[in-house]
Image: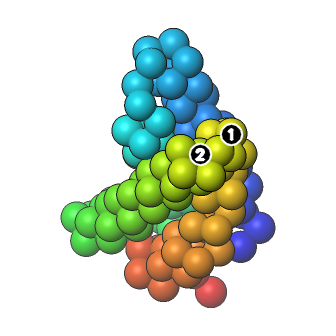
Amino acid sequence: MLRVGCSGVAASVVDVIMLLILVEALQVPVAIAAFLAASTGAIASFAINKFWAFRDPSPIRCPQLSGFALVAFGSALGTALSVQALSVGLGVPYLAAKALAAIALFVCWSYPVQSRLVFKVAHP
């Protein structure tokens, strides 16, 4: 779980940078920006998780990519809805809302599903 957490931090850096660019520089609405940024971070997350966190030496196959896409889409959608609710609905700054959403989704969704569905072969 520690390696997955570290890969999540790395992917989150990609995600947050993209979120800042989309919201601050390109004026994209927060919910859309959060979804796009989370999707970009998911690409980085897959690569880091596959080869480093879960040490999965198997070839990349469609079922694994499909499973990861499901996890990533669920995370991106959950992030977008959470950031929208927290930042627009409750006035929480969008970066703080993003951090809260990321932690909750990691614990409740992405780690459990990835470890059981996506990278199950390499997971102890």
Q: Earlier in the sequence, mark 1 or mark 2?
A: 2
Say left or right for 18 vs 69: right
Residue 111, given in percent of the width and then of the height, sits at 58, 73
**Disc 1 target residue:** 93
User: What kind of residue is marked 2?
Assistant: Ser
User: What kind of residue is marked 1?
Assistant: Pro
Q: Number of marks in the image?
A: 2
Dot 1: what SS? loop
Q: Quadrant of residue 35?
A: top left
> Residue at 77% across / 67% down in the picture?
2
Label drawn at residue 87:
2
Q: Nearer the viewer, residue 70 or 3?
A: 70
Classed neighbour count for the residue bearing mark 1: other residues with Cα under 10 Å, few (<14), some (14–19), many (≥20): few
* Cβ atoms under marks 1 and 2 closer than 8 Å: yes
> Residue at 49% across / 49% down in the picture?
84
Picture quarter with the N terminus: bottom right
Residue 108, given in percent of the width and then of the height, sits at 59, 78
